[in-house]
């Protein structure tokens, strides 16, 4: 059974700092991995999707990497801003099951 | 495009009442999903559909029913509401093409059962 873990559960950093969020999964037979952002009381916004054949994806100040063999992904946020404060969720997709398995998220607070 | 829309945004039910959560998407996506998110937890899949007329159970289907009569709409039905169904419900859709199965989420429905 696929399990997704995110560490740390919460993180507080000063504005301007670079930071890394971690995601690990137990079954490496994934189709892709998706990173989401969730603001309090809101829905999920897709940030980056990495296909299983890819090593990384970049969007603006965000860079996500994927190492299937070790069951790990990282989300790197450069020059953090208070507006980056949110919960970040990673989810893996095992194509045959049509299911997206979510981690429990990392709550990020960027202090001005 | 409006993307994925959900109604209502909030609802309070009494134990034993029934209701339907509405979900619609205008992106012509084949795949649609219903998730629930409990406080401090990740999202869990309730039901999903791979196209009109086809639905299947997810991880936590008990107490729920779905139908998919059109590509656009995927309503979720609660027949006998229970306090354990207090949660935030998210609907999502995906094109599920060979190039992408990225999922796009609606804003959610916050349901409280008292």
Image (cartoon, coloured by chain):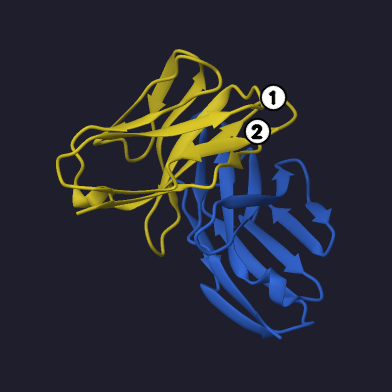
Left or right: residue B51 versus residue A32 is left
> What is the x, y in percent for residue A37?
62, 58
Q: Which mark is residue B97?
A: 1
Q: Is residue B106 above or below residue A85?
A: above
Q: Residues within 10 Å of mark 2 (few under 14, many from 20)?
A: many
Image quarter for residue A36? bottom right
Q: Foreground: B20 or A71?
A: B20
> What is the x, y in percent for residue A52?
70, 42
Position of the C terminus of chain B, as image quadrant, is bottom left
Q: Are marks 1 and 2 in contact (CB under 8 Å)?
A: yes
Q: Foreground: A95 or B49?
A: B49
Image quarter for residue A111? bottom right
Q: Foreground: B92 or B26?
A: B26
Cα separation between marks 1 and 2: 6 Å
- Name the residue carrying label 2: B101
Chain of the residue on which disc 2 is drawn: B
Please report the residue visible at 72 percent of the width from the left and 75 percent of the height from the top.
Answer: A19
Image quarter for residue B35? top left
Q: Is residue A91 above or below residue A81?
A: above
> What is the x, y in percent for residue B65?
31, 28
Colour blue, chain: A
Please report the residue visible at 61 percent of the width from the left and 31 percent of the height from the top.
Answer: B94
Please report the residue visible at 75 percent of the width from the left and 67 percent of the height from the top.
Answer: A76
Q: Chain B hue?
A: yellow
Q: What element does badge 1 sit on?
A: loop
Residue at the outermost left position: B16
Label count reads 2
């Amino acid at each position: 059974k696929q399990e997704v873990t995110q560490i740390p559960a919460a993180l507080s950093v000063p504005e301007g700092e670079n930071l890394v969020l971690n995601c690990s999964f137990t079954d490496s037979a994934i189709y892709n991995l998706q990173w989401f952002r969730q603001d309090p009381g809101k829905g999920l916004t897709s940030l980056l999707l990495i296909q299983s054949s890819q090593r990384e994806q970049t969007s603006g100040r965000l860079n996500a990497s994927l190492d299937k063999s070790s069951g790990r992904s990282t989300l790197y946020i450069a020059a953090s801003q208070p507006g980056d404060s949110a919960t970040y969720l990673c989810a893996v997709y095992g194509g045959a099951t049509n299911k997206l398995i979510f981690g429990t998220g990392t709550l990020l607070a960027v202090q001005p | 495009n409006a993307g994925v829309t959900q109604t209502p945004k909030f609802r309070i039910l009494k134990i034993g009442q029934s209701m339907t959560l509405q979900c619609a998407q205008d992106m012509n996506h084949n795949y649609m999903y219903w998730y629930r998110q409990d406080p401090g937890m990740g999202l869990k899949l309730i039901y999903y559909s791979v196209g009109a007329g086809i639905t299947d159970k997810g991880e936590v289907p008990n107490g729920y029913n779905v139908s998919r009569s059109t590509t656009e709409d995927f309503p979720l039905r609660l027949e006998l509401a229970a306090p354990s169904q207090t949660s935030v419900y998210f609907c999502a859709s995906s094109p599920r093409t060979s190039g992408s199965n990225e999922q796009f989420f609606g804003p959610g429905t916050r349901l409280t059962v008292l």
